[in-house]
Image: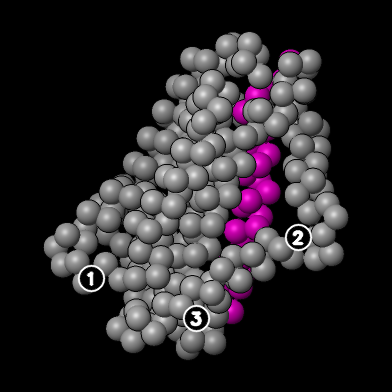
Amino acid sequence: MFKKLIEHEFLFKELVKRDFKTKYKGTWLGMAWSVLSPLMMFFVMNAVFTEFFGRTTPHYTVYLLIGNIIYSFFSESTKSGMTALRHNAAIITKVNVPKYLFILSKNVQTTISFLLNIVVLFIFVAVDGLPFTWKFFLLLYPTVMLLIFNIGVGFILSALYVFFNDMSYLYDVLLRLIMYMSAIFYNVDSYGEYGRYFLLNPVYGFIKYFRCIIIDGVIPSWQYHLLVFGYAALAMLVGGFLYKKYNNKFLYYL
C-alpha cells in the first residue's frame, strides 16, 4: 500500500486538495466550519444536558467536548469513506489507480479538522483549570489508533456501499445508536458494574482514553492499550480483506 501511495503521490495530493475545495466551496467561512460545526453541536448539548448531568460529572464542559469531537471525527471520516468509491466512479472506471487512495484522501481531510478541534479542546482545558502534563503526549497513541480504525471502517463501508445502496440509510441509524452508546453527554458510572459493557463500543473506548488522560490525569492500563489497538487492527484487517476480495468486482457495480 505505501509503495503505491508513493508512486501516486501527485494524484493523492490533488485528491486531498479537491476534497477540501469541494467541501467548503461556496461557503463564507470555508475551513472554519470544520471547527464551528462540532463546536455548535457542543454548545447545544452543553445547554441541554448540563442541568441533568453536569452537576455530578467533574469538568463537564471538557468531558462533553471530548466526546463530541471524537464522535464527530469518527462519524465524518467513516461516512465520507463509505461514499468515496461511488462518488469517484467517473475516475475509477476510466483510470487504473489504487481505489483506496480515495478513501485515504477523505481521512486526511477529516484528520486535519480533528487536529484543529483538539487545539480548541486544549483551550477549554486551560479555561477549565485542568493541568497540562507530559501525559498529554500519550494522546498521540489513541489518535493514531482512531485514524487507523476509521480507515478500516471506511474500507468496510465503501465495499458494502458499492453493492448495497441501502447501506447509507442503515449506517445513519447505526451512527445514531453509536452516539447514544458512546456516553458523550452522560457518565457510565451510574450503571455500576454494567458500565464496563460500554467498552464493547470502540468509539467509547477512544473517548474514555482521552478523558482518562485529560480529566483524570491517569494513564490507562496496558490492557486498555491493547483493547484500543485491537479495535484498530480488527477494523483494518476486515476492511483490507473485503477490499482485496472484491477489488476487481467494484468496476461492475460503480
| Mark 2 lies on residue | 31
Type of the residue with mark 1: Asp
Looking at the image, which residue is at 52% across and 15% down?
246
Relative height, residue 217 to residue 97 (above, below)? below
Query: Which circle marks residue 189 in the picture?
Result: 1
Alpha carbons under labels 2 and 1: distance apart: 37 Å
Q: Which residues are magenta?
A: 96-123
Q: Going by the image, does 23 lie left or right of 161?
A: right
Comes first in the chain, label 2 or label 1: 2
Taking the image as drawn, is residue 213 in sight?
A: no
Relative height, residue 67 to residue 8 (above, below)? below
Counting from the top left corner in percent of width and height, residue 55 is at 34, 86
Determine whether the residue tagged by mark 2 lies in a helix, strand or loop: helix
**Nearer the viewer's eye, disc 3 or disc 2?**
3
| Mark 3 lies on residue | 47
Counting from the top left corner in percent of width and height, residue 186 is at 34, 71
Do residues under tags 3 and 2 come within 8 Å of each other at their CB atoms? Answer: no
Do residues under tags 1 and 3 come within 8 Å of each other at their CB atoms? Answer: no
Looking at the image, which residue is at 49% across and 59% down?
70
103 part of magenta stretch: yes
Query: Which circle marks residue 85 in the picture?
Result: none
